[in-house]
Amino acid sequence: MTYIKEVNSMIESKQRKNGMYYFVVKAQNGQIVVYSEDYSSEAGRNNGIASLKKIMQGIIFAELKN
């Protein structure tokens, strides 16, 4: 599915030097457009990514309907 590949390529999982986890969302030109909050666990960060993907899917679906 093209949507999933596109969204997955936009989101990068990262870890700070202090051990906190976060993710960024990049535009098609590679520029970071969103920094997530810090998460104390990798699982927390992954849940944040999953939530963002659901939101993004809703936005894209709404755009396609219009």
Image (cartoon, rainbow, N blue to C red):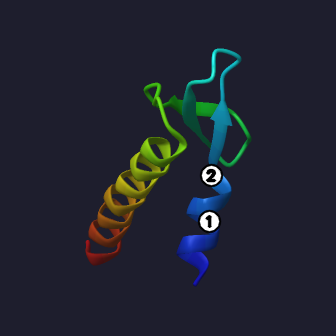
Q: Residue at x 66, y 30 (%)?
A: 15
The image shows residue 38 at horizontal and vertical percentages of 47, 25
Question: Which residue is most to the bottom?
Answer: 1
Of residue 59 and residue 24, the one placed in the foreground of this image is: 24
Disc 2 is placed on an element classified as: helix
Question: In the drawing, does residue 66 fall left or right of residue 20?
Answer: left
**Which residue is labeled 2 in the image?**
10
Q: Is residue 59 positioned above or below 10 on the image? A: below
**Which image quarter holds the C terminus?**
bottom left
The image shows residue 37 at horizontal and vertical percentages of 43, 26
Q: Residue at x 68, y 49 (%)?
A: 28
**How many marks on residues?**
2
Q: Quadrant of residue 5?
A: bottom right
Give the class, few, some or many, for how many residues have Cα within 10 Å of label 1's Cα (few <14, many ≥20).
few
**Which image quarter holds the N terminus?**
bottom right
Callout 2 amino acid:
Met
- Residue 37: image tag: none
Disc 1 is placed on an element classified as: helix
**Which residue is labeled 1 in the image?**
6
Give the class, few, some or many, for how many residues have Cα within 10 Å of label 2's Cα (few <14, many ≥20).
some
The image shows residue 7 at horizontal and vertical percentages of 56, 61
Q: Are marks 1 and 2 in contact (CB under 8 Å)?
A: yes
Q: Residue at x 63, y 32 (%)?
A: 32
State the CA–CA distance, disc 1 to disc 2: 6 Å
Q: Is residue 6 positioned above or below 10 on the image? A: below
Q: Residue at x 32, y 56 (%)?
A: 55
Callout 1 amino acid:
Glu
Question: In the drawing, does residue 45 fall left or right of residue 57?
Answer: right
The image shows residue 3 at horizontal and vertical percentages of 54, 73
